[in-house]
Image: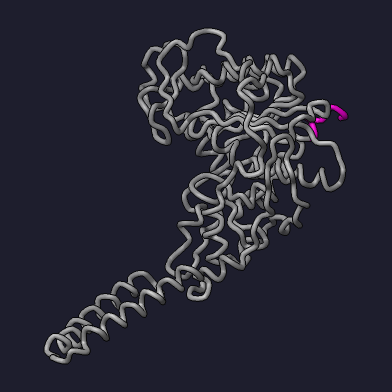
């Protein structure tokens, strides 16, 4: 039922109840009126309690959700990560997915399943080298606002296997979003009795792992000390690079991050963007010179119609029209071209998540099972990350010392 239909019916029933039921009861003098009303209210309360206790018995949507395929459970121990046997992955994404059957339950599950840290390892000890070696080599030259929601999360997946290799993942919530793939790969490797490296995640929600923030330089120093076999940078580029200041404004070092993100800001102009990429390239080049294999995730296309929350209209689902990757590249050329140039200049490898949910130039919005590619806002669904981000498999392979 459409929301506006429910509103009209509710108003109509309220009027009928007031005019026909309440009016009659007020004029009725029987002493049984009050007890009967009380019994009716008790009955409604019992019915409401039953609906709350067993929603699937009263709601088709809740029934679909309860029957939806749930991700395999992950649990973490004090010293090792206990992993369940890997579940069979849904069919791979292909061009036919646009016509797949997507249910309301799938949409709601994709939106709700955002526990990205689940199974991704124990918290880094405070005396861990991944924490203690992260020191800014010089005082950061201006005040840097950090909210309590942007505190660092450090997790170690498969600890104690540094002799197999080490991978360090740095970034924002999009790095958190990617954790499910590494958990899945560990499950598969464990089931096959194959070696798997230690993976360290160092992330901050809504913070740019870029030279305009002090933690970039600090973590570069950490990587130089640890010397992992591989390092992965996952950054939501369009969130932090939005130059809105006049091009004629004189540049002053260091380059500026936007105070308010996702829109053109007066703190940043194209000079800042150019210097951010130049310093980013210089930092990565120091890592590759040490023999560290560096990977950088590209800015994949994103738009609001990919958000499955926008597909819902009452009890119906309307998927968006096809989305062109070429059009996105043209629109964002000012960002993508210097990004790609800096990655090449640093002898690093560029990865594009969209390679795993595209058919040629066209982005697809669900997998073959019908699960949405995107979960909420600009983040991929956990289902997509876990089963379809195979572009990350090469990073784990590169981190193994036996390769």
Range drawn in magenta: 397-403
Q: Does the image show residue 296?
A: no
* Chosen colour scheme: one colour
Residue 223 location (% of width, % of height): 67, 19
Residue 159 location (% of width, % of height): 74, 31
Residue 318 location (% of width, % of height): 49, 64
In screen coordinates, is 127 left or right of 29?
Answer: right
Q: Quadrant of residue 215?
A: top right
| Residue at the extreme top of the image, as rendered | 138
Residue 342 location (% of width, % of height): 62, 22
Q: Is residue 122 above or below residue 327?
A: above
Q: In which quarter of the image is residue 268?
A: top left
Q: Does the image show residue 179?
A: yes
Q: In this view, does 148 lie above or below 13?
A: above
In screen coordinates, is 336 left or right of 72?
Answer: left
The N terminus: image quadrant: bottom left
Closer to us: 156 or 257: 156
**Number of numbered callouts drawn:** 0
Q: Is residue 249 magenta?
A: no
């Amino acid at each position: 039922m459409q929301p506006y239909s429910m509103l009209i019916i509710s108003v109509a029933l309220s009027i009928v109840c007031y005019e026909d039921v309440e009016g009659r009861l007020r004029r009725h003098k029987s002493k049984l009126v009050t007890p009967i009303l009380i019994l009716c209210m008790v009955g409604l309360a019992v019915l409401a309690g039953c609906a709350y206790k067993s929603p699937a018995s009263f709601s088709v949507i809740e029934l679909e959700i309860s029957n939806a395929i749930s991700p395999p459970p992950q649990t973490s121990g004090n010293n090792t990560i206990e992993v369940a046997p890997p579940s069979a992955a849904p069919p791979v994404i292909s061009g036919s997915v646009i016509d797949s059957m997507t249910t309301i339950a799938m949409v709601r599950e994709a939106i709700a399943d955002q526990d990205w840290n689940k199974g991704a390892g124990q918290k880094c000890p405070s005396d861990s080298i991944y924490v203690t070696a992260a020191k800014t080599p010089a005082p950061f030259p201006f005040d840097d606002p950090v909210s309590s929601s942007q505190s660092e999360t450090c997790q170690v997946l498969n600890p104690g296997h540094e002799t197999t290799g080490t991978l360090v993942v740095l970034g924002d919530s999009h790095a958190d979003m990617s954790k499910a793939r590494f958990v899945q790969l560990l499950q598969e490797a464990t089931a096959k009795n194959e070696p798997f490296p230690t993976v360290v995640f160092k992330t901050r929600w809504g913070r740019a792992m870029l030279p305009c923030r002090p933690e970039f330089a600090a973590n570069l120093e950490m990587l130089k000390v640890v010397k992992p076999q591989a390092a992965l940078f996952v950054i939501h580029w369009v969130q932090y690079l939005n130059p809105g200041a006049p091009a004629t404004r004189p540049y002053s070092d260091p380059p500026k991050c936007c105070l308010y993100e996702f829109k053109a800001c007066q703190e940043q102009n194209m000079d800042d963007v150019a210097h951010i990429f130049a310093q980013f390239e210089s930092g990565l080049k120091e890592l590759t010179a040490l023999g560290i294999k560096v990977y950088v995730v590209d800015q994949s296309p994103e738009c609001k119609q990919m958000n499955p929350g926008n597909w819902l209209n009452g009890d119906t689902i309307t998927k968006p029209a096809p989305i062109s990757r070429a059009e996105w590249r043209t629109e964002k050329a000012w960002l993508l071209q210097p990004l790609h140039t800096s990655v090449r200049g640093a002898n690093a490898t560029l990865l594009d998540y969209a390679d795993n949910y595209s058919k040629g130039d066209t982005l697809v919005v669900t997998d073959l099972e019908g699960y949405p590619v995107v979960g909420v806002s600009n983040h991929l669904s956990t289902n997509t990350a876990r089963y379809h981000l195979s572009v990350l498999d090469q990073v784990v392979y590169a981190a193994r010392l036996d390769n």
